[in-house]
Amino acid sequence: MSEMKSSSHDGALPRIGQRRVALVTGGASGIGRGLVEELLDRGLSVAAGDVNDGHLSALRDDLACHRPRLMTLHLDVAEPSDWSRAVAQIEARFGAIDILCLNAGIGILGPILGSRPADWTWLIQVNLAGATNGLASLLPGMRARGGGHILATSSMGGLVAANDGGIYSCAKFGVVALIEALRAELSDEGIVATVLCPAAVNTNILDHEALRPEHLSDSGIVPPPAEAERMREMARSILSLGADPREVGRRAVAAMDRGDPYVFTDGAVANLLALREAAILAGRSRGEGAK
């Protein structure tokens, strides 16, 4: 598969250490926390937004040494009003946000054929609209100032649809398309857009069903409680063998620093990408032969 267009400013873009303020959504745990810690270590002021207030409290306690440059706030990325409030609070304390890490996401899996409208609404609202809401709130300011970095967390599920991952992949494919298109459109404006496509990472992403809003509770893919817990335990055991979130944060920030279009967390994904590319090219060849 061809790579995203490189920015014509790639050689002259300010490095991450020259930026001042970052916002990380889903920033209180998992990959988001890894991004927060790495950006703090780079000397930036960082706002961590999250819907889990318990995780935010733990983050504040664990990173107390960074307190002057760390801000935590409740942020539901699916709610435009939350974005307006959060941006105003961050800018009042730190100034303009010039790094935006659109990391918040939920990992609810299940077959498309068993899904209901509420399943689609929740997944799309958080995993895709959560990113577009953030861009609507912050991209105009970045463009007016003539620079910035955007990182959006997709998934390997945003490039290859896995078993029972159809709804999830629909949203995550959208995130990849969003960043690929933005990177091309912003290539002459000093703004770098990068997409992170992690494979297995040791996070709590599959524990998010407890956060489902009551008005979206009519799910066709949530199994009975005993079966759900068994599946979560199996998923946790698999994810525990995945990449360390702190290392993923380090790798992602380094990629932003270089102006890279994509970030991966596991070299083994090369085989999956090669198989997908081969299948697409095979289909194209068959189509050409039918002319």
Image (cartoon, rainbow, N blue to C red):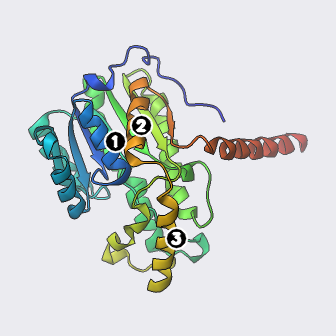
Residue 182 location in percent, x, y? 45, 35
Q: In the rendered view, would you say 8 is above or below 233?
A: above
Return the residue at label 2. Answer: 252
Say what secondary structure mark 2 lies in.
helix
Say what secondary structure mark 1 lies in.
strand
Residue 137 in view of the camera:
no
Q: Which mark is residue 234?
A: 3
Residue at 44% x, 19% y: name it: 10
Judge left or right: residue 156 versus residue 63.
Answer: right
Contact between marks 1 and 2 (CB within 8 A): the answer is: yes
Return the residue at label 1. Answer: 101
Residue at 37% x, 34% y: name it: 253
Say what secondary structure mark 3 lies in.
helix
Contact between marks 2 and 3 (CB within 8 A): the answer is: no
| First-in-chain label (3 vs 1) | 1
Q: Amino acid at mark 2?
A: Ala
Given residues 290 and 116, the one toward you in this image is 116
